[in-house]
Amino acid sequence: MTRSPLKRLAGMAPAGVLGLLCVAAAAPGLLVPVSPGALDLPYLAPGPQHLLGTDNIGQDLFSELVYSARISLCAAFLASLVSTSLGVLVGLAAGYLRGLWDEWLMHMTDVFLLLPGLPLIILLAAYLNSGLTGIALVIGLTAWPSTARVVRANVRQMRQNNFIRSAEAMGAGPVYIMLRHILPNIYPLVLAKGTLAAASAMVAEAGVSFLGLGDPHYRSWGAMLHEAFTSGGLLNGCYWWYLPPVACISATVLSLTLVGQRLIDPDDVPPVPARPVPSPYCSDDHKVPSKEMLRVKDLSVDFLNADGVLSRAIDHLDLTVLRNRRLAVIGRTGSGKSVLLLALMGLLPQNAVISGRILFKGRDLATLPEKAFRKLRGRDLSYVPQGAGSALNPLLRVGYQVAEQARAHQRMSRGEAMERAVRMLRKTGIPEAERRSRDYPHRYSGGMIQRALVAMGLISGAPLILLDEPTKGLDPANRDALLHILTQMDDRTLVAVTHDLGFAERFAQQVVVMLDSRIVEIAPSNRFFNKPLHPYAMALLRAQPRHGLQVLASSETGSLQAPGCPFRNRCGKAFSKCHTMPPLVDMGGHWVRCWRYDPKSTQPA
Amino acid sequence: MGISRGKIFRYLLSILFVLSLNFLIIQFLPGDPLVHLVGEEAYIHLQARNPSSLAELRAKYGLDRPIHERYLTAMADILRFRLGWSYQYGRPVSHILFYRLKWTLLLLGPALFLSAVFGLFLGCLCGRPGKNLPDRFMTPLFLTIYATPAYCLAFLLLLVFAFSCDFLPLGGMTGSAQTGRVSAGDVLRHLALPLCVLALHTTAYLTIIMRSTVRQAFTEDYVITAVSKGLKPRVVMLRHVLLNALSPFVTAMAINFGFIAGGALLVEVVFSWQGMGSLMYEAVLARDYPILSGCFLILALSVIGANVMADIFSTFIDPRVRDDAVAP
């Protein structure tokens, strides 16, 4: 998605403002014909002679404004230099050395963070009676803690990286590692924090100068405001005296802030892709036969990344899920199976582009407006998220969150819903469900969270339930208990995405294998686990413990952009035809995407 | 239950640091500490006329004693609210401070309350994902307001309101300072503009903070879970996003309390509102050091107090903090 030229221009504005200011600071003579010392009549309003009028002693305000830019910018730059260097120093040391160093440096940082900046600067400036450098130094000395904290957090994260570990293993000293390995890597962050520090330093300097504590020899914008305020510019209505410095301060601070934020977070504004256009479809598509729960037709999902490049997560997927059957989707991380679930739930992130159709209850979910989709969620199809992350709200009681699902669509009292939630939790194997339902999620173990999520998915009685890695982090006993619950439910259609082949074998009646955003095999569970057809599926099963853990020799991923079968480089049985994408071949209810099973293919299976 | 031991230690350390800093500035910065006690004019006068009396005074105030003794005396004085003598006003600093603090609180309290409410609301409005009209208009506006220091904003508002309409005064606290009678309506009329300026600036600031907190919250797994339940957008926002954003928001507000209060001080100067800000301004002009360090002390301690309050608030909101399971 390309931005409009106007927006691009607006994006350049902050840099433009800063560039202009730098010119003004470096060579004020270029912009101003009148020297700032020249006197004319006082209180002249803006006109051709004096672009911004004159002040109470008849000085040209425009030239003063331009000459003041140098002072304000220098003060801000110097203060930012001091605070950023100090912050980086403390942050580096605390983050890298850790232990007692870290603890005390962070104590010190927090103590400094709590000092109120402006009052301290006023106090020190009043005592020191010093000039511009003094004030800039004082501002710098009070502003470093936030930089130190951010740098420390980053360094701690970076310290885990292999290149730091290997440098340590080679015997490099801490100072060397910090300077040569870590500092270059946090350089963009330092630059961003420095820019933001310059913005707040400019505000602080202007404030101190406005109070009349600035250097009398070097007048900054803040000092101009002080003059305008104390010499009656404000009360006499000489708006030309104080508005320009106000505008300059605010434009500079805004520009610095925007540039700094852009540096920290380059894609703060994610491009919003166009909503999918509802495609007209034949009327017979409208109705899914009663035996079918869900039919996915030619579904593709792409993610638009920050550079405006689309990357494909699901590629032309067709799938039919029969009513009251259990389906397992297996495949490794990144094969698109979790994205498939999110697409079915309409929970894809903002930057996803979806095409194709998802037919469910006579509707196309791919183009369903959010409002209508909301009414389906939880009631007609429910979702059991992965338990490994923070799928439960940390601030609400577990029982309440389970009950919330029930209450979202059905009229029932709070107590009634809670009762049902407790029953559901007990059913999924939460011990002392009554008491534990009143606990907050952080008191639950990983396995208990997973079971609570399943309880949440089941409670509303939705006919179609989508489960994302339901056995992740469960021990064998818990896994068997969950399996028992899920296989008991004959009146629901279950779709589970999983890595766990052992679980898939016992859970599913139908298995779908995904590889690099495509389906490569669909088969009834017993046939699949007895005799998988696709070389990738065979490799997956061979890697199971009972088959002697024959791990795939190479984990090289076929590039999505390269045409042909994504597995051909690792297959070992690939031949010339594999450079084109094979179709799904029907082997009598067992579908496989491989040229070796194509009847027209020359190579025998 | 409550604030962790590490936090309490950190706050005590902060208080000790603020008190010591205040002491050290008086003792070690250029100039005779005696100036701090007798006033600049009297000091110069004595120095010219009667230098031996300076030594006597030094002995009287204990300035000739070793530093640690002086430090302990100073700490004991602070504990008894003896913050020194203001030669500009001829009264104890603590009396003046507490009188002026009232007026600052009258300005700062309502401004903070208003901007917290508006900031929460507008931040939620602007932080929603997807096509978001309020975000497109309000965020640039608020960024601009945030980039304009509060007292500059005061200039602008004065230009627009006070000169064009007679109802709102240019500054001061009451219209009838001579008679000494203070009516509530009069004070409110004088409070209106400074309050607006401060509330507007702080709202802009807090909205920006809240917006990024909300945007962050929307990427959390539990919000996706909440949406998958088919909850109404309003319920997702209030119960799942806002509830989780509340504690970071209040913490951010407390950490930036010093910044917000600093803005209030300068706004007071513009409107000649007789609070701490004007007090500091007058003290700067008169080089009244005891007042300045007293103001610093009060403000630094209230920033620490604000953070303690934010931590207590977190323990109410977040069960993990109550259980010491995470640092807030």
Image (cartoon, coloured by chain):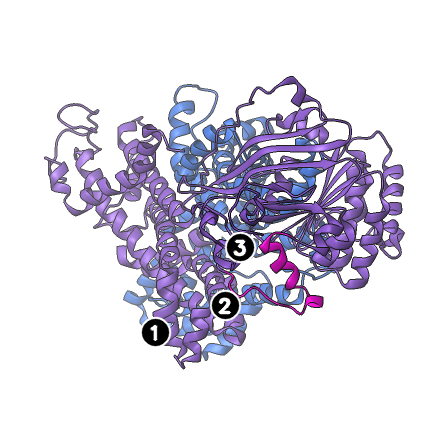
Of mark 1 and mark 3, the one earlier in the sequence is: 1
Q: Colour of chain B?
A: blue
Q: Residue B52 carries which label?
A: 1
User: Label 3 is found on which chain of the structure?
Assistant: B
Range of magenta residues: A533-555
- The answer to whether residue B174 of the structure is visible from this angle is no
Q: Distance between the residues labelled 1 and 3?
A: 35 Å
Q: In which quarter of the image is residue B233?
A: top right
Chain letter for mark 2, please: A
Instruction: Please state which amino acid type lies under the numbered disc 1.
Output: Ser
User: Viewed as shown, does residue B83 lie left or right of A147?
Assistant: right
What kind of element bears circle 3?
A: helix
The residue where tag 2 is placed is: A160
Foreground: disc 2 or disc 1: 2
Q: Which amino acid does label 3 sit on?
A: Ile
Callouts 1 and 3 on one subunit: yes
Residue A563: where, in percent of width, then height? 44, 45
